[in-house]
Amino acid sequence: MRYNSVFEIIGPVMVGPSSSHTAGAARIGNLARALLAEEPIVARFYLMGSFAETYQGHGTDLALIGGVMGFGPGHPGLATADLEAQQRGLEYSFQKKNFGFFHPNTVTIQLYGETKEVNLIASSIGGGKAEVQEVDGLPVKFTGERPTLVLYHTDTRGFLAKVFHIIDGFGYNIARLSMERWNPNGNAITVCEIDGYVRPELGETLKAWIPELQDYRLIRIE
Amino acid sequence: MSFKRLHELIHLADEKHMSIGQLMLETESEQSGQTKEEILEAMTRQFDVMAEAAHTGVSQPISSRTGLTGGDAYRVSQYLQGERSFLEGSAARAMSYALSVNEVNAGMGRIVATPTAGSAGVLPGVLVSLLDEGRYPKESLVLALLTAAAIGLVIANSASISGAAGGCQAEIGSATAMAAGALVELAGGNAEQVGHAVGLALKNSLGLVCDPVAGLVEIPCITRNGLHAVTAMAAADMALAGVRSIIPPDEVIQAMYDIGNEMPSTLRETGLGGLAATRTGQLLREWVLGDSSKPCKRGESHEI
């Protein structure tokens, strides 16, 4: 089921003018920031569909810029996010680009920090909800509404079994799971959504006990 | 469980001898692990944001960020103080409040998406007007938001609440149906009457395209919220009087989904067709956005 909570229908409290083009865009920015996991220096936004046609009037650009700087959909600073970006020295650009069959409100973000970069495609699917569609070219779907583990690893036999064992040891339930790889025994991404609150030690424990795990993010966008 | 069909929701409410709002509260509590009190508190905080946005534009003229629109909520509320108006009482006040919320939204102010920002005026319009009249206590109105949420969940899960996906019918149509159903429950109507109010309200919104001028949530969105606040009340009155939606509400929702799928993309929040494509619409677009390769003229001052 795509929508589960009353607060997805009545809410969020947000800065206008558009839930899909402003609030959803800010959330997408937040997701990109969480995946990068460091302060962004350069942000390149490629917009398609309705996003591309109307982004300026809806403040989609301000919301995306504000989002990658960590402003949530209700943050009053969204209205002047471009000025804040200048002050922080965040370089950004916007281009129209059609990149395939996605929801009409879809953006590709290339986000660069000091040491890391991330490339994601995400859609604003209505009412302020946002969903990641691709990470670094792999089809990977998540919203960040639940605590979400993004595991960057090599595709090896038994990897998931080890992950499950540790998650189970923490007493958590997996709500949604997907694994995608570039090729057998190559790099892979596993996305694991977990019910309830997740202690940050989970990520560290996984990293310590599973050598195939190269890197991870524990994402939760309020 | 989550809600996908209205008839299931109505059946479940009847079976448990609960209102739809109470059923929603119980379900939300089970799913989220939050207590009912916590949920109601969070919803009350949202209701307060709604009330603030509903009052802002009627006490003083406010303008959108682009300068395309503004001051209408104030105009209407001033006019309603005279004796010439056709609408009176709750409906008149709901109309001015709904206008206000969407003017606040267009000014990049704070609102609550219900279910979206473009349709954020309808529910606060009707509910805050009832609060100010003293007809219902705030707690009942907050519970009515849960009734509205249950209806919205059904529509969102079986059709759409996105104008880009389903046209304006998916946004304002959903909001109007949610408000109509919530009002019926507020007035003591049963779950089946809630369903008919949803059907009646949504049928009246079928086919509405999303063709805002310059792609902005201003023309025709702001006045449409004002008008649909009145429609929601009318649909609730019809359902309470015993008028039925001959096409079952779930089938109306399905029809909305199908119509949305057949809508060309020029009429789904791209700012390309319909009103946006009119001569005046294009002139206004040029005035606001200028050359589309240049940034929008933001925050310019102007008179309203």
Image: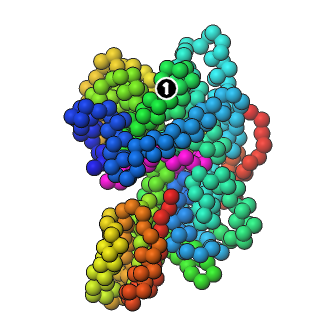
Q: Which residue is mark 1?
A: B137
Q: Name the chain under label 1.
A: B
Residue positioned 55% across, 79% down in the render: A117
Judged from the image, the secondary structure of the residue bearing numbered disc 1 is loop
- The quarter holding residue B68 reads top right
Residue B121 position within the rendered picture, expressed as x and y whole percent measured from the top left: 54, 35
A28 to the left or right of B205: right
Residue positioned 60% across, 46% down in the render: A16
Residue positioned 21% across, 34% down in the render: B15
- Decide whether residue A16 is among the magenta residues: yes
Question: Quarter holding the C terminus of chain B?
Answer: top right
Which residues make up the magenta segment?
Answer: A1-22
Q: Is residue B251 visible?
A: no
Residue B153 drawn above or below residue A30: above
- The quarter holding residue A110 reads bottom right
Residue positioned 37% across, 41% down in the render: B25
Return the residue found at the far top. B83
Residue A103 position within the rendered picture, expressed as x and y whole percent measured from the top left: 43, 58
Q: Is residue B302 visible?
A: yes
- Decide whether residue A104 is among the magenta residues: no
Residue A67 drawn above or below residue B106: below
Looking at numbered disc 1 in the image, what kind of residue is underneath it? Pro
Q: Nearer the viewer, residue B287 or B48?
A: B48
